[in-house]
Amino acid sequence: MLKQNHIVIIGGTACGPKAAARARRLDPSAKITIIEQRDNLSTATCGLPYFISGVIEDEGDMIARDTDYFRNVFDMEVLTQTRAISIDRNSHTIETLDLASGKSNTIDYDKLVIATGSTPIVPDWEGKDLDGVFTLTDLPDANAIRSYVQQLETKEIAIIGAGLIGLEMAESFVKQGFNVTVIEALDWLLPKLLDFEVAAYVQKHLQDYGVQLLFGQRVTGLKGDSSGKVSKVITENTEIEAGLVLLSLGIRPNVGIARDAGLTIGTTGGISVNQYLQTSDPDIYAGGDCVENTHLITGGKSLVPMGSTANKHGRIIGTNLTGGSDTFPGVLGTAIAKAFEYNVGRVGLTESEAHQHGYNIVTSLVPGPEYADYYPGGKQILVKLVAEESSGKLLGCQVAGPGEAAKRIDVMATALTLGGTVDDLGDLDLAYAPPYNSAMDPLHNAANVIRNKRDGLARTVTPMEVKGKLDNNEDFVLLDVRGEDEWKLLRFDVPQSRLTPLPELRQRLSELSKDDEIIIFCYTSVRAYQAQRILNGAGFKNVKFMEGSTSAWPYEDYLD
């Protein structure tokens, strides 16, 4: 009689339960044990900001599968409120601690899965243990925050860190009537996910909803009141009143038990795994937030903690636990978030990341409608595309705005996975009908801008470069080719600005000097590019257009 395969899984949030469920479907006879230190399995942690805001009302909706489901339907042993203390690889055993009774136990395994997730980063600041200081990683955290805000005597809340959780929680708190200040040590919103132009586009939207954004501010500590509750955030430059403080400073892979067992930890700090998601011990697999992944663009190792990745890991591990040989190719850092009425997504490399990895790049910044502009109700998006200059290979994309961003990010994730180029993207046969898209999708337009740059047709400057010229009071012509009605609504109030509507440009060429540097803009840059070609055809050499034009101008400065 064959020995029953005993699979033990440490961790019950995403990767662990997925691995267990897959293993059970493939091997109905295996003995499967899940060890989880919390009360529940399969908590939908990515939905916690929406549970706190009340969009998701019922706590039960945050549990994808309850514990009894795994016990009764999958015939598994589920040990909740149980912590795995150590792994003895020689004896194939795990020491556990029952957190309710304090009793220890030893469990044997044939195959082991480490899915221990991550731990929030909490600096050793004075005041970090005050009442009202929270992190957000699980359902108990969310319930504690919900309870705390109900008794807050102040409307002031501070979020330290402008990452994804900070962004989502800013919306959650504002919608509950609180005044929110987001404090970020770096220089813009979502600094690890977005380049400045796109981040600034989103920042203006948050500010429209009253969110106070403080960048370049390093927190040094927290102060409390006489009752031990947090009351202020202290930075190098100022003090911010706050009755609740959310620490949203990122996470670290939870690798303690793996390190103590002698498993290899990668250069990123995550558990090192091979393509089969095996650790340095072939009988031990690992997945989810605690492991490092291969980046599909650079080939290097990265930490990309996402629930989607954890579930993919779990399925592959479950297959391989039961004799399979599935492989995990890697990640692209794909992410998307909701920020009030804006959708914000990225995939692949940002411009700054591409530079850091040694790529010579070309980019485009293209605003446009989510579908045909003559079909009512369409909303804008801003697309930034990053490609390798020599080959045209796509490297990354960012999309933000009130319009449909997710499908563009998903198209780009597919294109990047398949090693596509800007030519591939520009010719991609995407679905078109006026309620769903324009005949040329914004991604087509972004690819075509790069193609035009490559072919020497389009010459551009960024909004940041234009602002630098204005700040330095440089001598150039900022040529507005919009209509006069648009000019009356919004214009650059600077001496360099000159209005010449596009239909009049050919007739008014004599008003411009071929010796001047001319930078052209309109609303989205479509007319500005046409104007650049007209001027080039008339012998003007020093002519460029501002990418994104007024739609992508991320500043309050100079606009009237």
Image (cartoon, rainbow, N blue to C red):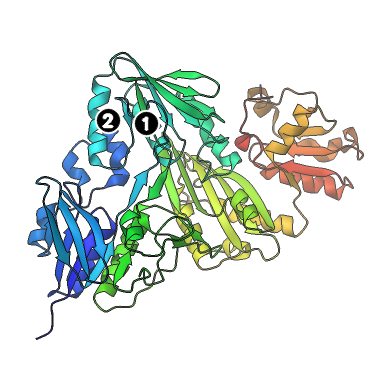
Q: Position of residue 104 (x, y in %)?
A: 13, 54
Residue depicted at x 56% and y 41%:
198
- Where is residue 339 drawn, in percent x and y? 43, 36
**Sooner in the amino-acid sequence: mark 2 or mark 1:** 2
Residue 522 in the image: state x and y as whole percent: 68, 37
Q: Is residue 136 left or right of residue 476?
A: left
- Which of the pair 46/509 is nearer the observer? 46
**Residue 553 seen in render:** yes
Instruction: Look at 69% across and 31% down and name the residue there.
Output: 483
Say if 208 sits above or below 538 in the image. Answer: above
Closest to the observer: 162 or 448? 162
Amino acid marked by disc 1: Leu
Position of 364 with respect to 103 (left or right) is right
Residue receiving disc 2: 145
Measure the C-alpha gap from mark 2 to mark 1.
Answer: 9 Å
Residue 413 vertical placement versus 155 (above, below):
below
Quadrant where the C terminus lies? top right
SS class, disc 2: helix
Query: Can residue 431 be spotted in the picture?
Result: no
Residue at 78%, 38% in the rendered image: 519
Local SS, label 1: strand
The N terminus appears in which quarter of the rendering? bottom left
Q: Mark 2 and 1 residues: CB-CB less than 8 Å, in contact? A: yes
Image point (39%, 52%), residue name:
305
The total of numbered circles placed on residues is: 2
Q: List x then y, in percent, for residue 117.
A: 32, 52
- Three-letter code for the amino acid on which mark 2 is drawn: Ile
**Which residue appears farthest toward the bottom when viewing the image?**
1
Q: Which mark is residue 246?
A: 1
